[in-house]
Image (tube, rainbow, N blue to C red):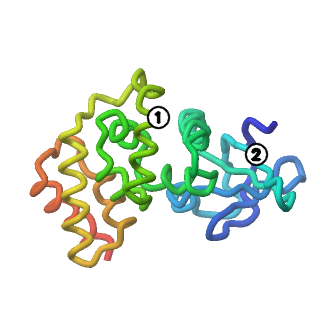
Amino acid sequence: MIGYISGTIQAIADKYVIVNVNGVGYRVVIPEKIRNSLSEIGQEVKLYTHFTMNPRDGSTELFGFDSPEELNFFELMTTVSGIGPKTAQGILSSANLQDLQLSIVSKDDKYLSKVSGVGTKTAQRLILELKNKIMTADLGGKTAGDLSSEGEAMDALESLGYSKYQAREALKNMDKKITKTEDKITEALKLLGTKK
């Protein structure tokens, strides 16, 4: 229906933004990671969108993403039984696209449920139903070992009192050459320390 919208931000709320496109304000539900990158009213933005309508009550929502790849993966996830648009967007908000795809291809349900907040059964269902569909995806040279050390580092940071979001952001922003769990934890603590 609406492939993307491009305009200026009129309002920023917890779960959505209002984008002014030639005098029409579109309310777009966005993931947490996009919301944190939006800083000010009047900023230009382009969001790739997915339109949904709830047949029970007739309500409609427009979901927005940074890239066509994220939008495509979102639409792929909503084909899995029990995964609705809000859950799919929450999963995409939790980690970068390549890591999510790699966790599915490598059947790593522990990492998938750890970063996305879905239960083990839902993570296993995602793996079962999507593994073959994303086998051809470009995973950016990452390996299952990279995910394992990242999951361990997330656990350690959470046990130190940092939120899932803070741990994810610190791990996402560090040098990709850091692969050992201990080194990831040390670097993440340095990054988190500079933000306090």
**Whether residue 21 can be seen here:** yes
Q: Nearer the viewer, residue 46 or 122?
A: 122
Q: How many marks?
A: 2
Give the amino acid type for the residue marked by disc 1 in the picture: Leu
Seen in the picture, residue 101 relative to 32 is either above or below; the reply is above
Question: x%, y% of residue 39?
Answer: 58, 62
Marking on residue 10: none
Q: Is residue 62 left or right of residue 120?
A: right
Question: x%, y% of residue 112?
Answer: 36, 50
For discs 1 and 2, the disc positioned in front in the rendered view: 1
N-terminal of the pair, mark 1 or mark 2, is 2
Q: Residue at x 30, y 74 (%)?
A: 162
Q: Nearer the viewer, residue 41 or 26?
A: 26
* The image quarter in which residue 28 lies: bottom right
Question: x%, y% of residue 96?
Answer: 41, 45
Q: Is residue 100 left or right of residue 155?
A: right
Element marked by disc 2: strand
- Mark 2, other Cα within 10 Å: few <14 / some 14–19 / many ≥20: some
Residue that mark 1 sits on: 130
As measured in the structure, the alpha-carbon distance from the residue carrying label 1 to the one carrying label 2 is: 22 Å
Residue that mark 2 sits on: 51
Q: Residue at x 48, y 53 (%)?
A: 91
